[in-house]
Amino acid sequence: MEVWSNLGSIMAAVIFIRTMAKEYLPPEFYGFLSKSLRSLIGIVSSHISVVIEENDGMKVSEVYEAVQTYLSVRSCSAAKRLKLKKPQHNKEFTFSMARNEQIAEEYEGIKVWWVFHSSERKQQIMFSWNSTSEEKRYYKLTFHKKHKHIIFDQYLPHVMAEAKTLEIRSRYRKIYTNQSNSRDYEYRNRVWTPVVFDHPATFGTLALEPELKQDIMEDLQRFLRGEKYYRQVGRAWKRGYLLYGPPGTGKSSMIAAMANFLDYDIYDLELTQVKNNTELRKLLFTTTNKSIIVIEDIDCSLDLSDRKKKKKPQKDGEEDEKPSKPGKPDERESNEDSKVTLSGVLNFTDGLWSCCGSERLFVFTTNHVDRLDPALLRSGRMDKHILLTFCTFGAFKILARNYLSIEDHELFPDIGDLTEAAQMTPADVTEHLMKMADHPSRALENLIQALREAKERIATAALKGISEENASATEGQV
Ligand SMILES: Nc1ncnc2c1ncn2[C@@H]1O[C@H](COP(=O)(O)OP(=O)(O)OP(=O)(O)O)[C@@H](O)[C@H]1O
Ligand SMILES: [Mg+2]
């Protein structure tokens, strides 16, 4: 035991000398001293160190994040200097080690040391006098050489497993967006910015025909259990859903319900903010497993005809041609710099890169399914097409239970007679129910009135349509 504590003191002394030297010595002397100390430790020590860096190429290393979570609990009792944080996506305070802080712990009688390092690196911006600084952060794990196998085969998997348990216990689910230029250092270099996802929609609150709801839930459950099956049949473990239907029929609510049901994070991809197909691929690559990748209003954010266009020959590395912009006018403007093409999105959902993670759902929504390219709709990309439509009587009963806390009422049959012909969206129905939530009878009367008016409007429009048709037919004959 004494040997360990001596070694711990030596390491602490070395860290202290290095910190002081960095503060007070000129950089060239510090570099030399640091190198010498490192090789000296290497010679006398029978220990090895493993470095776990924060950045793993394009994304934050999963191991780094796991180590951070794992040590956050231990640092609370073992470290002398701590950083206290309450991240947005966590339910509780978290602790992390301050710079150069060390924690020792024993695993199966083996002693290991963790040290947290961080250093700032200046980066010159091309063609500018300015420079940006980037922080390089890493954990260093030190242990005796003879325990190498136990550390790699047992201890590190134990760290990963424990971190996962801790994370599930402490975190809120997250929704990521690719829209923000975050000022928070933690997210500055990341392509996705997370915020807490706390949407209350569940399959219980969704107003859908019970059979459709059951079918979707079973499909999701099959997907959850499907890891072995997907591997066996040679498919990436992912599934695509297309939710289509008029505005206000519950497409976005269904995505929230799916995330709550599966306990997945959501990546809300704003396609108009993506510069080109390369960036799209990068975004895909940096999503985590167990997530839903959402593109809402896909027909508005992308030119869906580019596959049919004759392509210009391209030079190596050149992006696809710029699409013309359909969709809503405001989106056209923001899409000005975007060179994402349909083929980019097709590859995103079912190309070779789409299998770089697993347990992912792709969910696209649209109000106009007829505008989508068949290639986007085929199985393997959008495996399940779900039409969300006007409020049926079955769906109404769910809304009445949720909004008015009633299972039945004498006015229900009247509503049942009107729902189909009135073609009212669940969003409109909920508006009527919410206004009079304390008086269910009045809420239902108001709803019946609104349903009658909607039915009449539809009937009048239909009559107008027929008479216009007849008029043009007569004009044709003349
Ligand atoms: N099927 C439904 N079940 C329960 N609530 C619903 C349903 N459809 C709509 N709503 C309610 O109406 C509102 C709008 O629904 P939502 O945003 O999910 O519609 P949407 O289909 O995504 O519309 P859009 O096409 O305009 O994006 C929500 O606040 C939700 O509470
Ligand atoms: Mg929506």
Image (cartoon, rainbow, N blue to C red):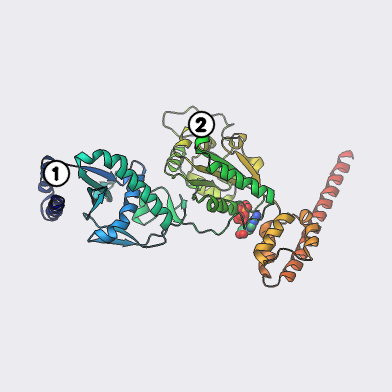
Residue 301 position in % (x across, y down): 55, 45
Tell me the CA gap for discs 1 and 2. Answer: 48 Å
Q: Amino acid at mark 1?
A: Arg
- Judged from the image, the secondary structure of the residue bearing numbered disc 1 is helix
Q: Decide: few, some or many residues near mark 1? Use Cα within 10 Å; few <14, some 14-19, many ≥20.
A: few
Observer-side mark, 1 or 2, equals 2
Say which label, 1 or 2, has the lower sequence index.
1
- Name the foreground residue: 422 vs 106: 106
Q: Is residue 158 above or below residue 448?
A: above
Instruction: Tell me if residue 434 can be seen.
Output: yes
- Judged from the image, the secondary structure of the residue bearing numbered disc 2 is helix
Instruction: Tell me if residue 298 can be seen.
Output: no
Which quadrant of the structure image shows residue 441? bottom right
Which quadrant of the structure image shows residue 184? bottom left
Label 2: which residue?
Answer: 232
- Name the foreground residue: 244 vs 302: 244
Q: Quadrant of the C terminus?
A: top right
Residue 17 position in % (x across, y down): 11, 53
Q: Amino acid at mark 2?
A: Gln
Q: Residue furthest top?
A: 313
